[in-house]
């Protein structure tokens, strides 16, 4: 639970304060830490960290309207990753980036379409979502490779797996 709390805080900071303003809000790299949490923590803990970190960022930066979408999108995103491997950067987790992109881009597009009643104008936000996914994926790959190389990930994943049976 402590690691999930740390991830929640890191996701909040890198979503709320390390971002580029865009058409609908901002483009950030916080998703990279959601991917990392999903690869290190049991699914319920990763889903909490991703959803709550993103919701805090939305609510505390003036974008509370996006919080319901963020809660669902970020919680669903973690479902594609596995923490049960000895490595953070494994085939399943790299392939999990693809559905994570689809969930993020499609989820926010659909949410904005519903709240605005317009299915054309929200398409203008898609390049920002693509950029967000690309930067977050690159961050995840770099951090996961570094943590795998140090052996930290195997210890953390093993400890989390041992506690959650």
Image: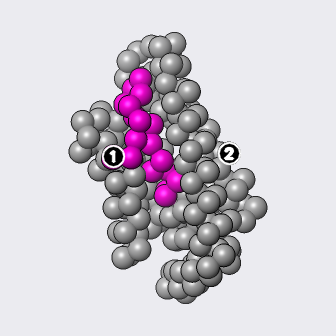
User: Relative to the observer, which residue lies in front, 41 or 25?
Assistant: 25
**Position of residue 3 measured from the top left corner of the image (x, y, whole percent):** 41, 74
Q: How many marks?
A: 2
**Magenta residues, start to end:** 16-34
Residue drawn at the location 37% of the way across and 69% of the way down: 6
Where is residue 145, by image quadrant? bottom right
Task: Mark yes or no: residue 96 visible.
Answer: yes
Q: Which residue is mark 1?
A: 16
Secondary structure of residue under mark 2: helix
How far is the residue under mark 2 from the one under mark 1? 24 Å
Residue drawn at the location 38% of the way across and 18% of the way down: 116
Residue 92, which numbered label?
A: none
User: Relative to the observer, which residue lies in front, 84 or 97?
Assistant: 97
Residue drawn at the location 64% of the way across and 58% of the way down: 141
Where is residue 26, by image quadrant? top left
- Which quarter of the rendering shows the N terminus? bottom left
Asked if residue 79 lies left or right of residue 122, the reply is right
Q: In the rendered view, would you say 87 is above or below 133? A: below
Where is residue 36, by image quadrant? bottom right
| Identity of the residue furthest to the right in this view | 91
Pointer 2 and pointer 1: residues touching (CB < 8 Å)? no
């Amino acid at each position: 639970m402590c690691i999930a709390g740390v991830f929640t805080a890191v996701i909040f900071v890198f979503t709320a304060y390390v971002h580029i303003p865009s058409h609908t809000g901002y483009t950030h790299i916080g998703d990279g830490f959601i991917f990392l949490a999903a690869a290190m923590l049991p699914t319920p803990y990763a889903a909490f960290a991703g959803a709550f970190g993103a919701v805090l960022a939305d609510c505390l930066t003036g974008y509370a309207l996006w919080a319901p979408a963020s809660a669902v999108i970020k919680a669903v995103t973690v479902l594609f990753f596995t923490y049960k491997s000895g490595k953070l950067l494994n085939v399943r987790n790299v392939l999990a980036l693809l559905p994570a992109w689809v969930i993020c881009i499609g989820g926010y597009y659909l949410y904005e379409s519903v709240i605005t009643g317009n299915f054309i104008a929200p398409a203008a936000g898609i390049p920002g979502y693509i950029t967000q996914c690309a930067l977050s994926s690159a961050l995840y790959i770099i951090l996961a490779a570094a943590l795998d190389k140090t052996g930290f990930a195997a210890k953390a994943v093993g400890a989390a797996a041992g506690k959650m049976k």
